[in-house]
Image: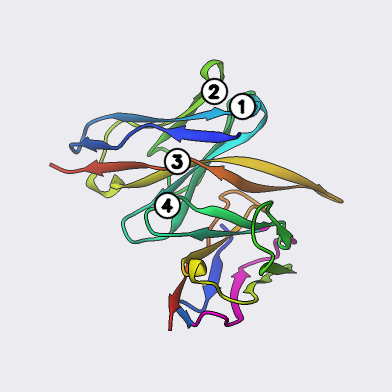
């Protein structure tokens, strides 16, 4: 059974650092992209970036580039999302998701098929 | 970035109704379109990928159509458990943007 299990809720102060995790199981972790999605309180889904565990190739949304770091440790089937200096505006639920692909005539179409349960990050002084 | 715009929002409907949610892309995305359902306090759940392919285990009352810039998600006969927020997402290019969401409410 495919599962993505995320680390627990965090409460931090502005300026602190944080690293949250997403552990995959039940599939070949190295062969599927992992994505990170932010959901601020009462708001919609925002695509942050993706990483390929096989070679650590990473793509960021311009909105999040330089604000967070996405990394992976394929030896333990775990992806990470990291902040060096949190702001109150980072308060949100963060989801990781596995990205599968379907082959079509002109290539492959990705889609987010399995999601973690989410990690709530609260930043408050 | 490709902008994804959903309509309507919100949407009020009754059990048994046929409902359609529309998603429009700011440029052509071929069939690189997924639909997700999210209930309060839960992670999103994949319903449809590649514009019209039903994810395994998703009830057949859900269907997707469209290509290029205009897409629809249709629920043929609303069930009580379908009241939720629905999101479209393009995966044609990064950033793989989501629509703003359509909240499906009980009339």
Observer able to see residue B74: yes
Q: Residue at x 67, y 42 (%)?
A: A100
User: Above or below — where is B5 with respect to A97?
Assistant: below
Chain of the residue under label 1:
A
User: Above or below — where is A100 with respect to B95?
Assistant: above
Residues tagged 4 and 1 counted as in contact (Cβ below 8 A): no
**SS of the residue under disc 4:** loop
Residue B2: percent from left, percent from top: 59, 60
Q: Are marks 2 and 3 on the same chain?
A: yes
Q: Is residue B29 magenta-colored?
A: yes
Chain of the residue under label 3:
A
Front position in the image: B84 or A97: B84
Residue linked to disc 4:
B42
Residue linked to disc 3:
A65
From this viewpoint, which residue is outermost toward the right? A105
Magenta-drawn segment = B14-33
From this viewpoint, which residue is outermost toward the top? A75
Residue linked to disc 1:
A29
Chain of the residue under label 2:
A
How far is mark 2 from mark 4, CA to CA?
23 Å
* Of the image marks 1 and 2, the number of the one nearer the N terminus: 1
Q: Dot 3: few (<14), some (14–19), or many (≥20) neighbours within 10 Å?
A: few
Residue linked to disc 2:
A77
Q: Dot 2: few (<14), some (14–19), or many (≥20) neighbours within 10 Å?
A: some
**SS of the residue under disc 2:** loop
Q: Is residue A91 magenta-colored?
A: no
Q: Residue at x 69, y 51 (%)?
A: B56
Q: Which mark is residue A114?
A: none
Q: Are marks 4 and 1 on the same chain?
A: no
Residue A106: percent from left, percent from top: 84, 50
């Amino acid at each position: 059974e495919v599962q993505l299990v995320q680390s627990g809720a965090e409460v931090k102060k502005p300026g602190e650092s944080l690293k949250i995790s997403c552990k995959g199981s039940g599939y070949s972790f190295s062969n599927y992209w992992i994505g990170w999605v932010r959901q601020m309180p009462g708001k919609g889904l925002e695509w942050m970036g993706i990483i390929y565990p096989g070679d650590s190739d990473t793509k960021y949304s311009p909105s999040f580039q330089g604000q967070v770091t996405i990394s992976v440790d394929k030896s333990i089937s775990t992806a990470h999302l990291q902040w060096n200096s949190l702001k109150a505006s980072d308060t949100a639920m963060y989801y990781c998701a596995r990205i599968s692909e379907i082959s079509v005539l002109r290539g492959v179409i990705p889609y987010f098929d399995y999601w973690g349960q989410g990690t709530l990050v609260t930043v408050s002084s | 970035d490709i902008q994804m715009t959903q309509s309507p929002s919100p949407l009020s409907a009754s059990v048994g109704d046929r409902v359609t949610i529309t998603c429009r892309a700011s440029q052509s995305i071929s069939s690189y379109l997924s639909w997700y359902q999210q209930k309060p306090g839960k992670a999103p759940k994949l319903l449809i990928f590649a514009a019209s392919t039903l994810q395994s285990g998703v009830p057949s009352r859900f269907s997707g159509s469209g290509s290029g810039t205009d897409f629809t998600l249709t629920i043929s006969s609303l069930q009580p458990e379908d009241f939720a927020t629905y999101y479209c997402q393009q995966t044609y290019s990064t950033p793989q943007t989501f629509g703003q969401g359509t909240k499906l409410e009980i009339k």
